[in-house]
Amino acid sequence: MTVTLPLVFVLGVAAIAAAKYLGVRPWLVVLIALFGFYLAHSFLASAIDTTTRTGVTAVTHH
């Protein structure tokens, strides 16, 4: 049986865990999230997307 999880869900859980267990302040989490939104609208977005997809494929491909 194959289980699929969206990458945004996994990253969200990691951010919440970091905020809760590592003592990362909530304002820093918000700041990093806003940076991600602005970065998604920049010229680097396609390169980041391609690199992420390649990395996920390399990890999940058998």
Image (cartoon, rainbow, N blue to C red):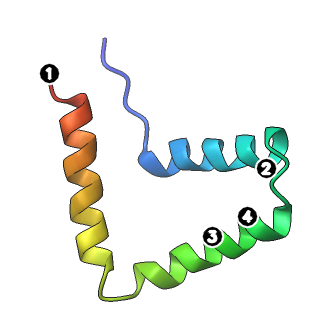
Report, in whole angstroms, how far the alpha carbon at label 2 lies from the one at label 3: 13 Å
Place of residue 26 in the rendered image (x, y in percent of width and height, measured from the top left): 84, 62
Residue at 41 percent across and 86 percent down: it is: 41
Compare residues 41 and 54 and report the one nearer the observer.
Answer: 54
Q: Secondary structure at mark 1?
A: loop
Whichever of labels 1 and 2 marks the residue nearer the N terminus, that label is 2
Secondary structure of the residue carrying tag 2 is helix
Q: Are marks 2 and 4 in contact (CB under 8 Å)?
A: yes
Quarter where residue 32 is shown = bottom right
Position of 37 relative to 42 (above/below): above
Q: Is residue 43 above or below residue 59?
A: below
Return the residue at label 1.
62
Gap between marks 2 and 4, in whole Å?
A: 7 Å
- Kind of residue at disc 1: His
* Amino acid identity at mark 2: Ala
Of 3 and 13, the residue lying toward us: 13
Label 1: few (<14), some or many (≥20) within 10 Å?
Answer: few
Q: Are marks 4 and 3 in contact (CB under 8 Å)?
A: yes
Q: CA distance from mark 4 to mark 3?
A: 6 Å
Residue at (45% x, 81% y) in the render: 39
First in sequence: mark 1 vs mark 4: 4
The residue that mark 4 highlights is 29
Name the residue at 31% across, 81% down. 44
Q: Which residue is mark 2?
A: 19
Q: Which residue is mark 3?
A: 33
